[in-house]
Structures are given as structure tokens and as C-alpha cells.
Image (cartoon, rainbow, N blue to C red):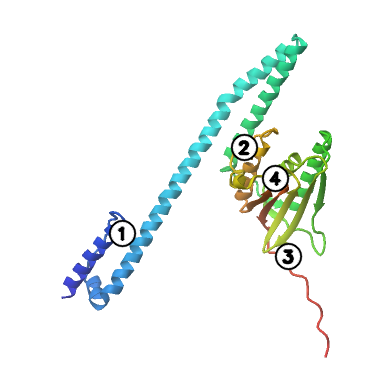
Amino acid sequence: MWWGCGVIAVAALTALAQAAWGGLTLSVTTAVPVAVALAGGGALTAVALVVVARRRHRAEQQRLRAQAQAQARTRHRQFLRRLDHELKNPLTAVRAAVADASRTATPVVAADLEVVDAQSRRMSRLLTDLRKLAELETAPLAVEDVDLAETVQDAVSAVIEEAAGRGAAVRVRLDLPAVPWPLPHVRGDGDLLYSAVYNVLTNAAKYTPDGGAVEVRGREEAGAVTIEVADTGIGVPEAELDGVFRELERASNARALPGSGLGLALVRTIVGRHGGQVRMASREGVGTRVWLTLPVAGPPAAAPPGPPRASR
């Protein structure tokens, strides 16, 4: 009697699973212990087996999805490397030919050649950024103790100097905590973290018109350091916010200005490789706020002592 109950229950369970998951094969080894268990509590055992089968099915789907994504990323990196390799030499030849022709060119032709040279340099920078992006996803990080406050200060100084050099009248204000303690350090690649902060600051300054302002703030909370860059620039249309961190994506209202569409993709990749997050909020015609959040190098700073108790 036990054995018959077990076989019937398992057969019914297999049919149920195949109907539920479109042909999923459920393998169950029917043995005496299983039959005994089914005889004593067949319904409960059947439910347990369905749960196990469903979890295995879900895990397999997740594994296949992750495998497909990894293969797609690998193909993408290979394509970017090949693109860099195939176009680097032709661009170098174009620039050399332009430089040679410029020596004897008339003023009108020289002006045209200058445009060709400028666009060739722009393409070279784009290829360099694409190669960096491809390498960043897998390259080992030079992990060290990084003073993020100092990194931010260096990036701010560089952006202010560049803005002044091109005659831009943008105010940049830096507000990093100093008391009761400064921002804690983070662990990571100092050069890459500088590049992430610098790219966000460069975008803020570039897309903020003369007379506008850029503010840089820092704070520590819940074992993480957050650097916020806020500006009064042109903003990003709400419908396009999700796409600005994808490579070669640019907001529709920013395409009149020079840019590769790779800066924020680099930022996202760098911060992600460091276990952090990037967020953006923006209003078109009002401004943009970007937050870079990174885990601290060690335990969070101790909370300040509370007020002394009054004596009784």
C-alpha cells in the first residue's frame, strides 16, 4: 500500500510540474523512504518536492541569464578593442597628412584642414575613452587607501582652472566637512576615483551657462561616503535620465556642445568597480544633482559623545 501511494503521488507531481513549467522534467528517485514518507504525509511531501523543483528551475534560469550577459559583455569588449585597433592607424595617418598639407596651404584651405585636424583629434579621444571603458570592466584595480576629500579638492582645482582658461564665468563652491572629523578614507584606485569625480565636475561646469554655479558637497553616513555635485546648468529631460549613464548616450539638449557621450559611462563603471553607486536627479532648464557613494575604508567614525548626565 505504501509503495502504490508513493508511485501515484510522484507521477501526479511530475505531471503537475510539467504543466506548470512548460515541459520541465522532474526527476524523482522513488525509494522505500520516499514511499513511507508519502504514505504518512503525501500531500506535504509533494508540496516540498514542488518547491525544490521550482527553486532549481529558477536558479537555472538565473544562471543562464547571467551566462548570456557575461558573454554579451565579452563580445562588446572585444568589439571596442578591435575598433580602437582598426581606426587608430588611419587617424594617425590623416593627422600627419593634414599637418604636412598645412605648411603650403592657402588661408582658406588651411582653415578647412584645421577643421579636419580638430575632428581627427576628437575621434582619437573617443577611441581612447572607448578603450578605457572596455578595459575598466575587467582590469585589476590598484587598490590603496584614498583620501577622497583630497581627491575632490584636486579635481575641483583642475576644473576651475580649465573653466578660467576658456573664459567661462561659473562659480564653483566646495563644502567638505572638517569638524568634528573629516571625511573618512576609501579603498580603491586613486587615479580612477579622481577620473570619476573629475568627469562629473567637468560635465557640471560645461553645461552650466555663464553666471551659474556648481556646488560640491561631501558627507558620511551608514558606512559610506557620498560626494554630491550640483549645478544650475541646462539639466536633463526627465524621459532621458535613465540613458545618460550608457555609453555614447547624450541628452538631446546637450548635443550642440562637444562631447563623446562616454564620461558618465566611465563614472558608472569606475564607481561600480569600487562597490559604490551613482545617482542623478535633474530638471531641464533648472539644474542637475549627481551623487557618488562609496564604502568607507574601515569602520564608520565613532559618533560624538552625548551630553554629560546631570548629577543627582
Task: Give residue 16's quadrant in the image.
Answer: bottom left
- Sequence-earlier tag: 3 or 2: 2
Q: Residue at x 32, y 69 (%)?
A: 47
Label 1 packing within 10 angstroms: few (<14), some (14-19), many (20+) = few
Disc 2 residue type (three-letter): Lys
Q: Secondary structure at mark 3?
A: loop
Task: Give residue 185's quadrant in the image.
Answer: bottom right
Alpha-carbon distance for marks 3 and 1?
52 Å
Q: Which residue is mark 4?
A: 235
Q: Which residue is mark 2?
A: 132
The answer to whether any part of residue 102 appears in the image is no
The residue mark sitting in front, 3 or 4, is 4
Task: Give residue 98's quadrant in the image.
Answer: top right
Q: Position of residue 195 (x, y in %)?
A: 70, 43
The residue mark sitting in front, 2 or 4, is 4
Residue 249 badge: none
Residue 20 badge: 1
The residue mark sitting in front, 1 or 4, is 4
- Sequence-earlier tag: 2 or 4: 2
- Judged left or right of residue 171, residue 297 is left
Q: Position of residue 271 (x, y in %)?
A: 64, 49
The residue mark sitting in front, 2 or 1, is 1
Above/below status of 41 relative to 249 = below
Q: Residue at x 59, y 39 (%)?
A: 247
Give the farthest residue toward the front: 285
Above/below status of 115 relative to 131 = above
